[in-house]
Amino acid sequence: MNWLEGLNPEQQQAVSHNYGPLLILAGAGSGKTTVLVARTGRLIDEKICESKSICVLTFTNKSARELKLRVQKKVGQQAKGLWAGTFHSFGLQLLRKNYKLVGLPAQFGILDQSDSQHVVKDLIKNIKNSTKEKFDIDKILNLINLNRCGKKASPDFVPEYHEMAEVLTPLYERELKKLGVTDFEGLLLEPLRLFKKYPEVLATVQNQYQQIMVDEFQDTNKEQLELVNFIAAKHLNLAVVGDDDQSIYGWRGAEIQNILNFPKAYDRCEVIKLERNYRSSSSILDLGNAVIQKNIKRHGKVLKSEKVKKPEHEKPEVFVLENEDEEADFVCREIMNFKAKGANYKDIAILYRSNTQGAFIESSLRRNQIPYSITGGTSIFDRKEAKDWLAFLKQSMDDDEVSYRRIFNVPPRGLGDTTLEKLAAYAETHHLNLPQASKKWFKAEISEKQGEIIDQFNNWLWTFPTRLLEDNTIGDSISKRFEFLVREIGYRDHLMKNTIDPVTGSGAIFDKRWQVIEIVGRILESFVGRRDPTLHSLKAFVDSMQLREDVGDDEEKQNKVQLMTFHASKGLEFPVVILVGLEEDLLPHKRLGGDIDEERRLLYVGITRAQERLILSYCRERKKQGLVRKVSPSRFLLETSNQLYTLFEMGSRPVVGSERDDLVKNFLNRTSPK
């Protein structure tokens, strides 16, 4: 098979690389996925190494799945065994194999952010705090995680927060072990501890994986880089792909130095730049290049468009509006303008720096009946109903203390806090977990009536997985059986009781919450349906949900305008992109934009999402804290040549040629007597 066919010279060079460190600087729209797929496939096809010896680390499950499918399609059965997944998936797999060494039970749970917050809240209750300060749990948890990673916290935190986090860090880690769980931070930290403490485990992993590849390397943090360095240390066959100009996640721990310093960190590192862009027109790239070149700390590269020049490849356009209301109306006019010229709604994306800007745009879109969807919103599995039923599933298959506590009295079954406290006390005294203690309720001073309720609940949980997978008497599909069991336990009635308005009888809130249950059922059926309907596939589903991996319905994307923040747009592309709010204090952001270079990279990411047309706007004034204030255009726009875009200071294009004739004709038709 010719793996180099159809590739440009730089792509061919990257795909042909066999051994040693490699940095592929892949500019926006330069075909990095094609290169990753071709290199992976060639290594297998040409017997450089077996598929089971390749490890590809990504940041989304979707990326990993796409790579595996494309490689398998070209290589066939030889590709079976290739490991591709997220850093957290890798950590989970490693901990599942070595759970005893890190002091976890075989089927340990994974805490999400809200569960971790609950643990911290409980720990704080038992600490005497002389300042009587009410702590922000989010900030405390953030500091705890920084302590766990050995990182310095921002000086913005007051001393009391540092002191409290210092006390809580060891208590928090001890509590996780006691509960038999880890959290997302632990999925990176525990493997590192494992490698340091047990060299034989590290040696096994190093021998297993002879070729390591990392996608989106600019987004890696300190722990991820350390993990990669451990695995690749023996053979140094490490290929990383990324773009320092698209490093926009510093606020959540990503360290741009990882990609900037990579050639210095690895001797004889080969560096290949992919600068040919297959996405955007040359005029869009000219503006993008001009913006990003103002950053000094970067690997120098200039994107060049490979698109055939068309007459409609216009310069980017900048519109000046009076205020945010006018800006929102302007966005709707532009959408209707592109729609009239043949564009679909889904071809158009509106990008903004702050979610609050999106509210104005949303309001105007609704008023004009323009369909839209918001990308990067709240995940369905962040909803209470979904988390409740994930807890039911987890506890039904293996004892999980956190899950059991969550569902112990959900829906209410007469088991209050006192009952839970008695069981928890008995469990601690007799070195049991809570689910184990619940089976010995009669020894924990629990009344017989409540004990019977606990037994009934435990028995129901015990039969839950089998009935969900096999019981055709309650439904002919997993989604129908799931809904039946949700109703049977009384959860639907519980939702109705708490959401139906007793005065108006309105069930709008209930409908939304029940819809979450229906969606979870569909996703569960879709996931298990792609595998054998077994207990193992149910456990895989739970793992995927806990890792927030994309296992949802693969429904065709609806024809709607896409609204999103600049951050949420990364990795996407659209024929038409409208960037709103290009003003000082919004971009760069006054409160969130401390790193000016990263804010500039954010604009660069927004610009390079556009394929054919790029529209930018800013206002002369904007309401801030209830007052209308004058605002200035973003410095990022002012520091680029105005020859790179067309400026419309009146907020609209002048009417010319046939458009003017049509307007006059329509006016005369309306005013002439019939």
Image: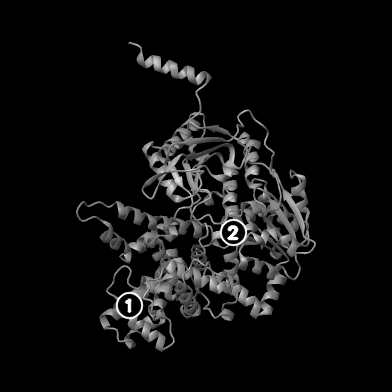
Observer-nearest of 323 and 123: 323
- In which quadrant of the rendered image does the C terminus lie? top left
- Tell me which colouring the rendered structure shows: one colour
Pinpoint residue 253: horizontal percent, then vertical percent. 57, 63
Pinpoint residue 231: horizontal percent, then vertical percent. 69, 69
Can residue 482 be seen from the camera position used here?
yes
Observer-nearest of 111 and 431: 111
Pinpoint residue 276: horizontal percent, then vertical percent. 70, 43
Is residue 601 found left or right of 360 in the rendered image?
right
Q: Quadrant of residue 629?
A: top left
Is residue 5 found left or right of 452 in the rendered image?
right
Mark 2 vs mark 1: give the one in front.
2
**What SS does tag 1 mark?**
helix
Work out how far the residue at label 2 is from the one at label 1, CA to CA, in angstroms.
42 Å
Kind of residue at badge 2? Phe
Pinpoint residue 81: horizontal percent, then vertical percent. 66, 63
Is residue 511 found left or right of 288 in the rendered image?
left
Report crowding for label 1: few under 14, some 14 to 19, many 20 or more residues within 10 A (C-alpha). Answer: many
The answer to whether the residue labelled 2 contacts the one labelled 1, judged by CB atoms less than 8 Å apart, is no
Tag on residue 454?
Answer: 1
Q: Is residue 111 above or below residue 307?
A: below
Q: Which residue is mark 2?
A: 59
Report crowding for label 2: few under 14, some 14 to 19, many 20 or more residues within 10 A (C-alpha). Answer: some
Q: Mark 2 vs mark 1: which is more N-terminal?
A: 2
Q: Is residue 597 above or below residue 290?
A: below
Tag on residue 657?
Answer: none
**What SS does tag 2 mark?**
loop
Kind of residue at badge 1? Ile
